[in-house]
Image: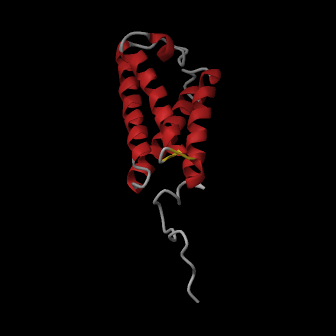
Amino acid sequence: MAGAWTKRGMPALGWWLIAVGTFRSAFTWSCIFGSVSLCSALSETHITDAHGRTAAMWTLLSCTLCFLCAFNLGSKPLYAATFLSFVYALCYLAVECLVFHTMRATSLTTFIFVAGTSMVWMLFEWNSDGHGHRRPRGATKQP
């Protein structure tokens, strides 16, 4: 299936991760350089400069993981780290929303869509693109 969804040699999952990384880098830029419109749109409380920069660096790390994984889908540890970055971020934001009430639920919809799509797609693609044991194309099972 991965072969059917390629564009110029890169699987569609790689292109998706590049798009997600680009979106995350825009969020990082917003939080670091004072354009708090995107950064503060997620929060119901006032975001301090230090909190904004911390969120930006955390997002920059996950952005870097997306880019690295997009170009190295065959690296099992990198793939797992990227997948877990989506899980951790989703869990963190859910706790902030449901337990501490520092975020609006409507602010999470875009992130839930992006992270959820990424996690499901990465789970489906886990055994392709070099992960696990795959028979070479045209190989037949010997009796």
Q: Residue furthest bottom?
A: 143
What's the residue at 41%, 35% (across, down)?
62
From the viewer's perspective, is residue 16 above or below residue 125?
A: above
Q: Position of residue 47 (x, y in %)?
A: 44, 14
Residue sitting at 45 percent across and 60 percent down? 130
Asked if residue 55 is positioned above or below residue 120 in the image, the reply reads above
Along the viewing direction, whichever of 46 and 38 lies nearer the viewer = 38
Place residue 98 in its image quadrant: top right
How many numbered tags mark residues here?
Answer: 0
Q: How is the image coloured?
A: secondary structure
Indicate the quadrant where residue 59 lies.
top left
Query: Looking at the rendering, in which quadrant would you find the C terminus?
Result: bottom right
Q: Is residue 52 left or right of residue 104?
A: left
* Residue at 50 percent of width and 70 percent of height: 136
| Residue 36, horizontal then vertical, whole percent | 45, 11
Residue 101 location (% of width, % of height):
58, 22
Q: Quadrant of the N terminus?
A: bottom right
x then y, percent, for residue 141 = 57, 81
Query: Which is nearer the eye, 79 or 109?
Result: 79
- Residue at image location 41% in from the left, 22% down from the top: 28
Up/down of 127 relative to 111, above or below: below
